[in-house]
Every structure is written in structure tokens, then in C-alpha cells.
Amino acid sequence: MSSPEWNNPVIKWVDSRLPVFSLMHHSTAGYPTPRNLSYWWNFGSLALTVLIVMIVTGIFLVMNYTPHVDMAFDSVERIMRDVNYGWLLRYVHMNGASMFFIVVYIHIFRGFYYGSYQAPRELLWILGVIIMLIMMGTAFMGYVLPWGQMSLWGATVITNLFSAFPIVGDFIVTLLWGGFSVDNPTLNRFFSLHYLLPFVLVGVVGLHLWALHTSKSGNPLGIEVKQPEDTIPFHPYYTIKDLFGMGVFFMFFLAFVFWAPNYMGHPDNYIPADPMVTPAHIVPEWYFLPFYAILRAITFDIFWFIPAKLGGVLAMFASILVWMALPWLDRSKVRSCKFRPVYKWFFWVLLADFIFLGYLGGKPAEQPYIIMAQLATAYYFAHFLIILPLMSKFETSVELPESIASAVLKKGDA
């Protein structure tokens, strides 16, 4: 694509030496985009927006935070009470984590439904899963920083999971703790990593966008661009659509910030951390609950060489890593569930199963919740490892449209 001609002499001078404006033009106004993208495609740009909000608010919060077990809780209280607009910064940052996961979960399940992981977008999809993993690590370490009761005990429980790994497990736990219990060295490690990982995340997001602009965006029909009429410029058509979606999203976001700021948190985290008092029910943040339910569902030894604790940890990690294998598990020539009449229903069952796992993750580790979690976990893995490969082999799909343009114009005529 040829570089545009700039009328402004300053922009022209800078662009001839560092073509940043040409890059921005090619990524927006000059980027051909399928003409049938729905509002489900807004969530990628929303995720980037929330990431920027989280980084900006985090930078201002860290100016007033003290990463020490004797002062961390009080420094957070000072931010809330004494720092100008500190309460707003903290509530935006705290609820922003939940908003980030809401947006990314919708983005991922949209990819499941429309087959966004299939060729030639395999690497784009894998980078997206890596982003999810980095997000989870960053969010977990951030949850520890207020040093409330749930921060301390959540860190204790989750870091102890690594002790399940033979030979290296105890070494990993000691390395994470910086000693032999969750204490000040642990808080310092988590604070350092929580501040570093968002910038790593920005780098991976950059690769994700690079891969997107190389393999081009998918679309609800799941067919490739075949003619110029299939596309429209990203700007102004989709910039306006994204801005509208952003306005609606921020109304939802700020409703929590101003009217229900602690709705998605845990009240125990407003109690200073006390290693001598164990909370009655230790739970992670809501966005970890489906994977926490999978972890606790493995209450039995697997074969004769994988104990239950290690099996639960492996199942928890496998529940996310299996997403990376989707481009090879799903061999269907049809991407979009719009044209897969049988598999479409299995997708909705998967979504319901994932939400049900989240519900079970917040319940005590007792019957009947354990058996429910085991059944839900069994279906979760069966969906990806059995149902999806079989459906892609035996399902009869609906006939695809000739092109994106023909489908859009036909719909308009109707």
C-alpha cells in the first residue's frame, strides 16, 4: 500500500523520517475491513481501551502505595480517604479489572462462536490466549497488594498449588514467597511483577494487532474477502461504531464505579491481613471462579502416578491451554456457527457450562457442589477434545454465501 500524501509540512517532514503517521493511516483509514462486522467485534477495541485505563490509573495509584506488609493496607486507606480523587482512581482501577475480564471473555467466546481461531489466524488466536494468561497473572498479583484478609490467604492458597509439582514444586513456592511463608518479600515480588506485567501485556497486544492486520479480520459469515466490494475502510465506518460501543460500555463501567464499587469485590479484603485468622471461605475474584472450580473438582488420584492435588493443578492450567489447540481440534471447513446447525447448540451448552463452573467456584468445597463441578469439568474438556473434533468431521453445514457483499446486499433487499 502506497504512503498517503500529507499536506501539513510538519507531518510530512516527520513522516519522511519516521513513518508513524503512515502507519496510523494504514491501520485505520487505509485498513480494508469486512463490511458486515457486528457489534460483537467492538470488544477487541474495548479491551485495548480498558488496558490503557488500567495502566494510567495504576501509575497514579503506585505514587501513593507502600509495598510493605506493615503499611500496605494503611496506604490503600490513605488513597481512599486523603489523596485527592484517590477513591476514584482506586475504584476505577479495581472495577476496571472486572471490566477487563468481562470484555475479554466476551471477545473469546465470540471467537469460539465464529471460528476466529481457524487458518490463517492460528497465531493471532494463540497470542490472544497468551494475553489472557498474562492478564490472569497480573490480576492475581494485583489482588494481593491491598494486603487484606483475602489478599493474604488467596496468595497463600494459590502459591501453595505449585508445591504439587514433583521435584521443583517446593523450590517454585519458596521463590514466589521469597522465604518460607507469605510475607513482606512476597508482597514486594508481587508488587514488582504487577507493575511490570501490564507493559509486557502491551507488547503482546502489539503482536496481536500485528497478526490481525497481517491475516485480516474475520467476520460473522466466516468467509474470506473475495472482491473489493466485500470491504469498507475502517475509518470512519468502524471508528464511529467503536466509539458508540465505547460510550455504552463506559456507562455500564461507571455505573459500578459510582453506585456499586464494591459489588464485585469481597468484604473480607477490608479487614487487615492476619496470618493467625483463617477466613471461613477462601475464594478468588469472580473471574477466576470457573478455573477454581475445575481445580477443586479433581478430588481423586489420576491413574496411579498423578495425585489429586497435582491433577487439579494440571486440569486448571489445561482448561486454558486447550484453547491454543483449537485451530487443530476444529477441522471443519466452515468457521461460523451461523452455518453449523448442530454445533451451534453445543456452543451454547459450553457457555452455560462455563457460567455454571463460575457459580460452583464460589461455593464451599462440599457436596453436592463437588460432584456438580466434576460433571461440569468433564463436559468442559469433552467439548473441546471429543465433541468439537467429531462435529467438524461429521456435521453437515448449511450452504455458505458466495461472498460477503452478496450476503449483505441480499439481506438489505429483504
Image (cartoon, rainbow, N blue to C red):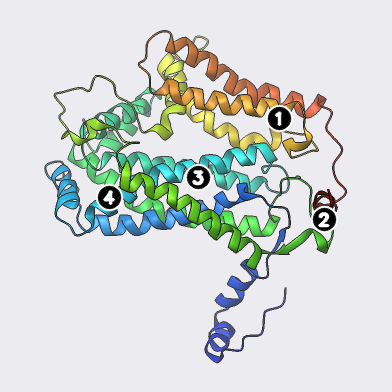
Reading the image, the residue beneath label 2 is 405
In the rendered image, the residue lying farthest to the bottom is 9
Q: CA distance from mark 3 to mark 2?
A: 29 Å
**Dots 3 and 2: beta carbons under 8 Å?**
no
Q: Nearer the viewer, residue 150 or 160?
A: 150
Amino acid beneath label 3: Val
Reading the image, the residue beneath label 3 is 103
**Dots 4 and 1: beta carbons under 8 Å?**
no
Residue appearing at x 62%, y 41% in the figure: 110
Q: CA distance from mark 1 to mark 3?
A: 22 Å
Left or right: where 285 falls relative to 411: left
The answer to whether residue 248 is above or below residue 145 is below
Q: Percent from the top left, x then y, of residue 375?
A: 54, 14
Quadrant housing residue 366: top left
Reading the image, the residue beneath label 4 is 90
Disc 3, SS: helix
Amino acid beneath label 4: Arg
The answer to whether residue 296 is above or below residue 87 is above
Q: CA distance from mark 2 to mark 4?
A: 47 Å
Sequence order check, earlier mark of 2 and 4 = 4
Sequence order check, earlier mark of 1 and 3 = 3
Q: CA distance from mark 4 to mark 3?
A: 20 Å
Q: Which circle, 3 or 2, is nearer the viewer?
A: 2
Amino acid beneath label 2: Ala
Q: Is residue 300 visible?
A: no
